[in-house]
Amino acid sequence: MSEPSQTKESEAGGHAARRYAARLSAVQALYQLDIGGEGADTVIGQFHDHHLHGADTGWFEDVVRGVIAFQAQIDTEISAHLSEKWSLHRLDKTLRAIMRGGTYEILRRPDVPALVIIDQYVTVASAFFDAREPGFVNGALERLAKKVRAAEFGLIGEAASEGSSF
């Protein structure tokens, strides 16, 4: 018989692993939607049928549908914080999908701590890229989170918006 703390720990670990799998799959689905050809329901259905083993399917669907529903706001938020040398459409499509997923969660999922969201999307970025892009994701999402969730970082008012360009 396992100790109660060990059971809770393994449940929490399993929960985190299912969420990570959902985020990774959501980024892949967002990429697929970005390159075009099929609608959201079709892509989501394909992922449900073939790619979501072990993933939190509700979380996957929330992220994908949430990005679609709030894409204009998400893209505006990302674009507003890119340096003058960059535009949203200049970003690699995979990187853009990662940024959209992370931005959606920071903006629309206050039930999840910003640092958890950032960590998860940096880990997702590491599945596709070397150190440069995960570092970009980390910095960009952290600056956005400090702006829109200042209280989580102990920031108040103007201090939260200083240096907010990605």
Image (cartoon, rainbow, N blue to C red):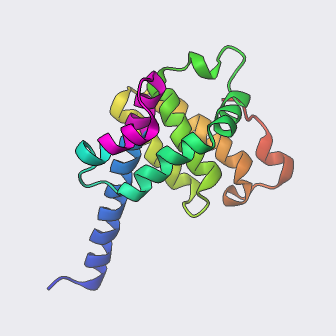
Residue 150: % across, % down: 73, 54
Q: Quadrant of the C terminus?
A: top right
What residue is drawn where x is 73% and y is 30%? 80
Q: Give the total number of marks visible in the rendering.
A: 0
What residue is drawn where x is 44% and y is 47%? 120
Q: What range is drawn magenta here?
A: 27-46
Residue 25, placed above or below residue 108 = above
Residue 14: % across, % down: 29, 63
Residue 6, placed above or below residue 93 = below
- Closer to the camera in the image, 29 or 160: 29
Dominant SS type (magenta): helix
Query: Residue extending furthest right?
Result: 158
Residue 146: % across, % down: 69, 48
Quadrant housing residue 126:
top left
Residue 87, placed above or below residue 149 = above
Q: Is residue 132 visible?
A: no
Q: Is residue 30 visible?
A: yes
- Closer to the camera in the image, 147 or 76: 76
What residue is drawn where x is 33% and y is 49%? 21
- Closer to the camera in the image, 99 or 144: 99
Quadrant housing residue 143:
top right
Q: Is residue 4 left or right of residue 143?
A: left
Quadrant housing residue 140:
top right
Q: Is residue 28 left or right of residue 52?
A: right
Q: Residue 14: within the magenta? A: no
Residue 163: % across, % down: 75, 34
What residue is drawn where x is 67% and y is 35%? 72
Q: Quadrant of the N terminus?
A: bottom left
Q: Is residue 107 left or right of residue 2?
A: right
